[in-house]
Image (spheres, rainbow, N blue to C red):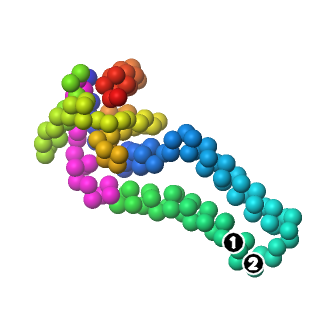
Amino acid sequence: MELKGRIAVDDLMAASRVHARPRRSFAVLGILLLGLAVFVVADSFLRHGQSLTDPMLWILPGSLAYLAFMAFVWAPKRVRQSYRQRKDFQHEISMLITSAGIETRTEQGHVVKPWSDYLKWKEGNSIFLLYLSDHLFQMIPKHFFAANEDIDAFRDIVKQSVK
């Protein structure tokens, strides 16, 4: 199977989100903690009648606002900056998927990675991440594939080849 395309800033954003996505158990725990935080803040305002000037009342909402800022403003800004700095993303990439591994070609060079080099993989709505270490991954955007059947075939190959 042969793939071609250019990495776009949206691909890097998608990869960042998929990479940061927690395991299901941590996601459920996070949602429960967020619900508890909202309940505690609402309870403080409604039941105890605390003054809005009480600094302790603003610690939890301030922390949540900070986390939201980091996730929705700062992180995307850093991803866009990284995309501008990575000149290798500006060139077309050609990938050949075989039973032996992935062969990648660009104007700058040629790399062959056997399947045994990949530790794990993740899939998002628009991208596959193939991990070479816990924090280093190869992105394969789904828009590189010619048809949905090719995406399904690639997923099957990855399931069999990456343990």
* Mark 2, secondary structure of its residue: loop
Query: What percent of the width, then of the height, locates residue 79?
Result: 38, 56
Do residues under tags 1 and 2 come within 8 Å of each other at their CB atoms? yes
Q: Which residues are magenta?
A: 82-98
- The residue that mark 2 highlights is 54
Q: 149 or 129, which lies in front?
A: 129
Which of 14 and 146 lies nearest the eye of the viewer? 14
Direction from residue 40 to residue 144 in the image, left or right: left
Q: Name the residue carrying label 1.
A: 58
Residue type highlighted by circle 2:
Asp
Is 154 positioned to the left or the right of 38 in the image?
left
Q: Residues within 10 Å of mark 1 (few under 14, many from 20)?
A: few
In the rendered structure, does residue 89 fall within the stretch colored magenta?
yes
x then y, percent, for residue 68: 57, 60
Q: Look at 33% across and 40% down and name the residue there.
A: 131
SS for tag 1? helix
| Identity of the residue drawn at 35% across and 28% down | 163
